[in-house]
Image (cartoon, rainbow, N blue to C red):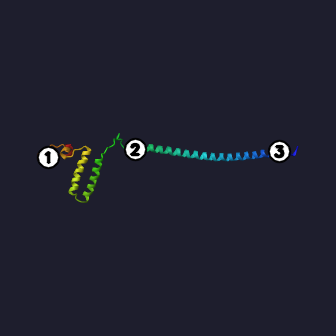
Amino acid sequence: MSKNSQKSQNDSSNVQSIDSIALAMKEALLKDEIKQLQAHNIGLSQTIDKLLKQLEEKTSEIRHLQDMLMKTVPVIGDITPIIVSDEEVIAEYQLKALKSAAMMRDLTLDEVKRFDLLVKNKRLAQGNATTIEAQKGLPKNLSKDELIQIASKPKKEIE
């Protein structure tokens, strides 16, 4: 054989050996990556299992607490929201302010008038009567004896 053909054979065998070495290196790298991914996958599986177990425990605990709550607290039924008007809220707030002032000192005449007006406005906002007679449903012309008799009755009998 000639030197050229021998050289080309050596070159092709060198290329094949380089290719086989490169292929072997790629396979080794892929095997390492596969091992890392498998280890990562195992870790993720363990984490998922742990979280699922915790979720099951918490769900069980929630059911237990709901059962305890149902047994101890009576169910009222559908609760309708109480609608409070702005006028009523303002009157309530101002009445509280007047109450705290009255705890510290005597109210001025102006404050007493404000108190009376606020009480009437609050009662009107609630749909209640603004006078004592209208609230109690007492007749206007009662004798002293009748008034004493009403006052001496227990509260349950009056209602």
Give the residue at x 75% y 45%. 19
Check the picture and name the quadrant holding the C terminus: top left
Q: Secondary structure at mark 1?
A: helix
> Marks 1 and 2: which is nearer the front?
1
Mark 3 lies on residue:
8
Mark 2 lies on residue:
69
> Marks 2 and 3: which is nearer the front?
3
Q: Upstream in the sequence, badge 3 or badge 1?
A: 3
Q: Secondary structure at mark 2?
A: helix
Q: Position of residue 117 (x, y in %)?
A: 22, 50
Give the residue at x 81% y 46%. 11
Q: Secondary structure at mark 3?
A: helix
Which amino acid is tagged 2?
Leu
Q: Residue furthest right?
A: 1
Q: Nearer the viewer, residue 104 or 94?
A: 94
Which amino acid is tagged 3?
Ser
Q: Upstream in the sequence, badge 1 or badge 2?
A: 2
Q: Residue furthest front?
A: 4
Quarter of the image for residue 78 reads top left
Q: Which mark is residue 147?
A: 1
Which amino acid is tagged 1?
Leu
